[in-house]
Amino acid sequence: MQKQLEEICEKALKEIENANSKADIEKIKLEYLSRKSILNNIKKGLKDLSPDQRPILGAFANEVAQKIEKSVEKKEKDIYHKELEEKLETEKIDITLPGKTIPSGKPHPLTKTIEEIVTIFQGMGFTVTANENSPEVETEYYNFDSLNFPKDHPAKDMQDTFYTKVAPNVLLRSQTSGAQIHTMENKKPPLRIISPGRVYRCESVSARKNNLFHQIEGLVIDKNVTFADLKGTLNEFTRLYFGEARPTRFRTSFFPFTEPSAEIDVQCIMCKGKGCRTCSQTGWLEILGAGIVDPNVLQGVGIDPEIYTGFAFGMGVERLAMLKHAINDIRLFFNNDIRFLEQF
Ligand code: PHE
């Protein structure tokens, strides 16, 4: 039996030495170390030996088993390292290959522009009023009458404003100025708010005009507010928005809800005032409407114009975005062409 064990040991160790893969090792384990292995069969036969032989051969059988086990363990480790090295060699990563870029979404250029403008005004102490404060589906009262528009004002014409079939006086707001009235009805002065949102006008669509566009309304009401405050605020805004101090020009204008009223031009971004196609050779670009809030408007919402004064302004978001980024067609904002949107 001793001889048999020695032979098994020798054979097993040789096989282990020649083993080259995990599969080889598994086979060896099954053959020599499992319950059904030759070694185990021999161990089972120990009980038939004489009592003085049994412990000696038993110990020897264990010794053989341990030897085989140890040798298997060592070989397993060797194979593991060998395979790892092979893997490292064959699966080398080429770090010079260009990576796969995952396209990621980002805010629409108009959303970005609104955020930029809002941030500038927040920095000057303005609060943003939420949209629910001033709905897009509006009544004639908030869009026109409360803003001191006379009954027969041409802007109220069906040609300029979208009316709905809900009721004769329900329309899609043509300006954000209604937000002034909603704000003053809900809050007591002092007020310093801006209100961004969509507006609608019944116009033929072109490179310069779209039926839907965005405005940002501004309103300041306090004691002793003057035209100088309006000028200072809007000059600071243009400086921050266009990134440098740009000459501005305040032109006399007319809006029913402000008196005096002004239209504000900024020196042409393209030609720096020399005159070009963008500014129709004038050197100036209109960016804002503004003025001192008309006493009639204040009275209409129960604010005493003898105590409070204020200024209001309104700007077109598309126009400001177009000027800053040299975009020549307003329709680009609404066509959702990824080649355009990607550039922002
Ligand atoms: N609502 C005016 C427009 O749409 C702009 C404006 C707002 C003018 C506030 C004065 C004050 O043209």
Image (spheres, helix red, strand yellow):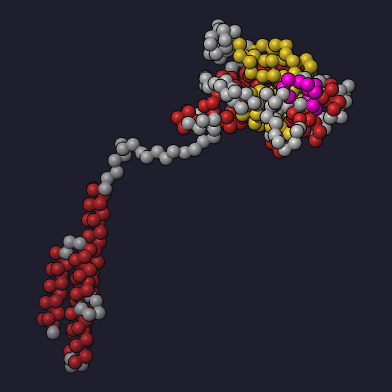
Q: Residue at x 70, y 31 (%)?
A: 163
Compared to 302, does 36 lie above or below? below
Q: Residue at x 12, y 81 (%)?
A: 4
Q: Is residue 36 left or right of residue 272?
A: left
Span shown in magenta: 145-156
Would you identify the image quadrant in which residue 189 lies? Answer: top right
Viewer can see residue 63: no
From the top left corner, tell me how far across and down residue 239 is, in percent.
Answer: 62, 18
Q: Is residue 287 magenta?
A: no
Compared to 201, does 72 lie above or below? below
Q: Is residue 286 left or right of residue 100?
A: right
Ligand 1 shows up in the quarter that is: top right
From the top left corner, tell me how far across and down residue 41 is, in percent.
Answer: 20, 83
Q: Is residue 153 magenta?
A: yes
From the top left corner, tell me how far across and down residue 259 is, in percent.
Answer: 79, 17
Q: Residue at x 33, y 36 (%)?
A: 98
